Amino acid sequence: MLEVLSVVVQVIHFRRTGRRLFRMSPLHHHLELSGWEEAKIVFRFAVLTALATGLAWSLGGGV
């Protein structure tokens, strides 16, 4: 979801201001251009996914 939202935000911001919010969209490309290594990005996204999944299961009752 974060990747999709970064594209939507980038497009809306660019259309309104004529300037880019991120260096490149989707978000992982922006992070790569900021100097993050691919392995670091993948690991952090995996951790965020695991945390979001755990939160969803705890709030949703785990169907």
Image (cartoon, rainbow, N blue to C red):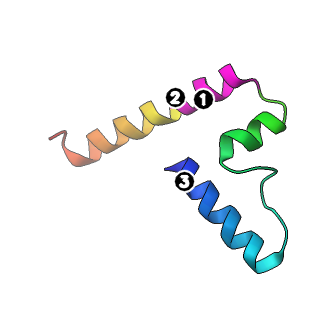
* Separation of residues labelled 3 and 1 (CA atoms): 17 Å
Please tell me in which quadrant of the rendered image residue 58 appears. Answer: top left
Q: CA distance from mark 2 to mark 3?
A: 18 Å
Q: Is residue 6 left or right of residue 54?
A: right
- The x, y position of residue 42, in whole percent, is 60, 26
In this view of the protein, which residue sits in the foreground, 9 or 53? 9
SS for dot 3: helix
- Residue 30 in the image: state x and y as whole percent: 76, 44
Q: Is residue 58 left or right of residue 24?
A: left
Identify the mark at residue 4; answer none if there is no mark: 3
Q: Decide: marks 2, 1 in contact (CB < 8 A)?
A: yes
- For marks 2 and 3, give the one nearer the viewer: 3
Q: Is residue 50 above or below residue 3?
A: above
Query: Farthest left residue?
Result: 63
Q: Position of residue 17 (x, y in %)?
A: 81, 77
Q: Amino acid at mark 1?
A: Arg
| Residue type beneath disc 2 | Val
Point out the stretch of residues depicted in magenta.
Answer: 37-47
User: What residue do we see at 66% from left, 29% from top?
Assistant: 41
Circle 3 crowding by C-alpha within 10 Å: few under 14, some 14–19, many from 20: few
The local secondary structure at tag 2 comes to helix
Nearest-to-viewer mark from 3 and 1: 3
Q: Earlier in the sequence, mark 3 or mark 1?
A: 3
Crowding near pointer 1: few (<14 within 10 Å), some, many (20+)? Answer: few
Q: Position of residue 7 (x, y in %)?
A: 63, 57
Q: Is residue 63 left or right of residue 35?
A: left
Which label's residue is closer to the chain start, 2 or 3?
A: 3
Q: Which mark is residue 47?
A: 2
Identify residue for label 1.
44
